[in-house]
Image (spheres, rainbow, N blue to C red):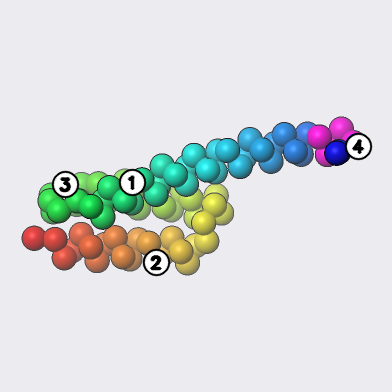
Amino acid sequence: MANHQSAKKRIRSNNAKRLRNRYYGKTTRNAVRKLRSTTDKKEATESLPKVVALVDKLAKRRVIHKNKAANLKSSLVKHVNQLQ
């Protein structure tokens, strides 16, 4: 158990950050999953910029690695371009 006030505060702030990161990560994963399951090109084209923005924010906050964000965005764009 933490013995110093600063260590206790660090535990609290780390827990808050972890919960926030989990929320944003889960929201983004759900958005990616929804975009991948979309078969309508118009709908997918409209939602692609929003999903890309979510992925970029996760990479900026270092929740996911920047290369993973780039790979995700690339695969999503490929998916949208292949739709009829």
Task: Say which label, 1 or 4, has the lower sequence index.
Answer: 4
Residue 60 visible? The answer is no
Nearer to us: label 4 or label 2: 4
Q: Which residue is mark 4?
A: 3
Task: Say which label, 3 or 2, has the lower sequence index.
Answer: 3
Instruction: Please tell me whether mark 2 sits on a helix, a strand or a loop.
Output: helix
Instruction: Please tell me whether mark 4 sits on a helix, a strand or a loop.
Output: loop
Amino acid of disc 4: Asn
Q: CA distance from mark 1 to mark 3?
A: 13 Å
Please state the extent of the stretch shown in magenta in the rendering: 4-8
Q: Which residue is mark 3?
A: 43
Task: Say which label, 1 or 3, has the lower sequence index.
Answer: 1
Residue placed at 20% from the left, 47% from the top? 46
Label 2 Cα crowd, 10 Å radius (few <14 / some 14-19 / many 20+): few
Residue sitting nearer the eye, 6 or 53: 6
Q: Which residue is mark 2?
A: 71
**Magenta stretch: residue 20 in it?**
no
Which quadrant of the rendered structure holds the C terminus? bottom left
- Report x, y in % for residue 41: 13, 54
Task: Say which label, 1 or 2, has the lower sequence index.
Answer: 1
- Report x, y in % for residue 51: 33, 49
Q: Is residue 69 left or right of residue 37?
A: right
Instruction: Please tell me whether mark 1 sits on a helix, a strand or a loop.
Output: helix
Tell me whether circle 3 and circle 2 mark residues in contact (CB < 8 Å): no
Amino acid of disc 3: Glu
Tell me whether circle 1 and circle 4 mark residues in contact (CB < 8 Å): no
Tell me whether circle 1 and circle 2 mark residues in contact (CB < 8 Å): no
